[in-house]
Image (tube, helix red, strand yellow):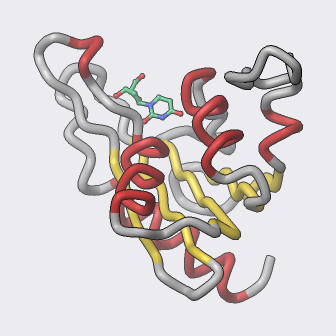
Amino acid sequence: MTESDRDLVEKAREAMGRAKADYSGFSVGAAVITADGRVFTGANIEVSVFGLSMCAERVALFKAYSEGGRDIVALAVAGSTARPISPCGACRQVIWELAPDARLLLANRDGSAVAEHNPADLLPRGFFLDTDRN
Ligand code: THU
């Protein structure tokens, strides 16, 4: 891992501290960085209608896109887990579409274990809204 990877993992871990996870008790943080060096963070936010809650990865990616950040080169995720977090299926589709070329840095709660992946290995044959490509 480079120094900038380590910084991004630390930003994801800091974001984890801003999770609103009062129903599950499970905090997640994420941080994305664009080619021009802009960083956007996200944390999971839970509401009382549980299905309306949102994962940290999607908060970070939607923040980036809505602020004009497009070319995402890396995405770090940190979960309150002993082993590196494994993103949920919904986030895998969103990562695959919005950050197809990103390096994924998946970390555990204290950042001592970081697994590197790419979007296609987390989601083989993701969904395309294109009848010819499916
Ligand atoms: N969660 C995330 O934020 N990211 C994931 O990849 C897995 C799950 C959140 C959703 C919910 O707030 C809590 O973790 C437990 O599922």
Q: Quadrant of ligand 1?
A: top left
Q: Is residue 123 left or right of residue 62?
A: right
Q: For this rendering, which residue is in front, 3 or 82?
A: 3
Give me the residue at 68% from left, 76% from top: 5
Q: Which image quarter is the C terminus in? A: top right
Give me the residue at 79% from left, 14% from top: 131
Q: Which image quarter is the N terminus in? A: bottom right
Q: Is residue 28 left or right of residue 75?
A: left
Q: Is residue 13 left or right of residue 46?
A: right
Give me the residue at 79% from left, 58% from top: 101
Q: Is residue 59 left or right of residue 95?
A: left
Q: For this rendering, which residue is in front, 67 or 37?
A: 67
Total number of numbered discs in the rendering: 0
The spot of residue 73 in percent (x, y) is 70, 70
The spot of residue 102 in percent (x, y) is 73, 60
Which residue of the protein is positioned furthest toward the left in this rendering?
A: 48
Give me the residue at 48% from left, 69% from top: 69
The spot of residue 34 in percent (x, y) is 58, 75
User: Does residue 105 lie above or below 47 as drawn?
Assistant: below
User: Does residue 100 lie above or below 15 as drawn?
Assistant: above
The spot of residue 43 in percent (x, y) is 34, 49
Please tell me in which quadrant of the rendered image residue 63 appears. bottom left
User: Does residue 7 lie above or below 101 as drawn?
Assistant: below
